[in-house]
Image: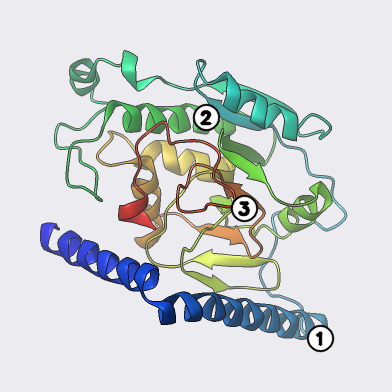
Amino acid sequence: MDDKFALYSFKKVIRSNWINKSRLGKFLFPIKNGIRKIFSVFLLFIDHILFIFKQDNIKSLYRQSEFIHFETHCINLIRRLDKKKFIADQFDNVSFNLKFFPAVDGATLNLEQLIKQGRLAPDNRDLGTGNKLTPAQIGVYLSHYELWKEALNSSNKITFILEDDAFLDCEVATLQKVIHYIPEDTDIFFVNHRKNKKQHINPYISKFVGRFWGLTSYFVTKKGAEKLLQLTAPIHMSVDDMVSRLNEKGLINCYCSRQELVIECSNAKDRKNFRFASDIQDRTEERD
């Protein structure tokens, strides 16, 4: 783990320095990104054409004519009133049944007690740094875990879970259209995917392949919530890593919207959308 992390960090520094200091790098970088975007739009257009003539074989969780009911839960530290307002303003005129969940504050946790209770593994560690999980990371994990309980007990098929740095970057109608295509075997359906590797299923849906990162915004199904509650205790790693690992092993099915519908605003490398410093820790160098 240490050797891989050191090699990754070395490559990161070299790539970053080349882009920042080389005039050629500064010239080529936006061209490369532009070509990627054009190619992505072209592939999406082809998929739409093919989808018209040959309907997707994946069975959806909902019928196209069905009205989808769900609750929206946003994880928010009580002391972060700025983030609470940020979310509330976005959902002010949206009938998403928004509820704020008081996040488990890592600063108040008794880690030794959690280990004795069997909720925290003694050998817990952060896969990115190799260190023990921070109290803040454990608090985030427990917050998501409690909301999976809410999802399991909900009368709805899906529950929408947000972290309080989520920015809805689409029309509500777009989000509602996309979630009609959630596959029937979905456990978690993400509406943001950052730079994670994906396999396109149809013009609306992709499937996460390999390792991925980020729980900023997602829908969890009742079946998915049940699996997560059974498979994610005690805490061995960060909740992001745990969900990713379960998907890699084929124990859960993680899909995402093909279009990036929500943006994380705590990523310091995303200068356009960056608004808040992370309440956990700055891990952009390890993850992005």
- Give the residue pinned by disc 3: 191
Give the mark nearer the N terminus: 2 vs 3. Answer: 2
Left or right of 43 in this view: 50: right
Q: Residues within 10 Å of mark 1 (few under 14, many from 20)?
A: few
Q: Secondary structure at mark 2?
A: helix
Residue at 58% over, 37% down: 162
Check the image and report above or below for 183 versus 43: above
Q: Quadrant of the N terminus?
A: bottom left
Q: Which mark is residue 53?
A: 1
The quadrant where residue 115 appears:
top left
Q: Nearer the viewer, residue 30 or 209?
A: 30
Q: CA distance from mark 1 to mark 2?
A: 40 Å
Residue type at the position of mark 2: Leu
- Give the residue pinned by disc 2: 147
Residue at 34% over, 46% down: 283
Q: Position of residue 119 (x, y in %)?
A: 28, 26
Residue at 34% over, 37% down: 281
Q: Position of residue 151 (x, y in %)?
A: 58, 33
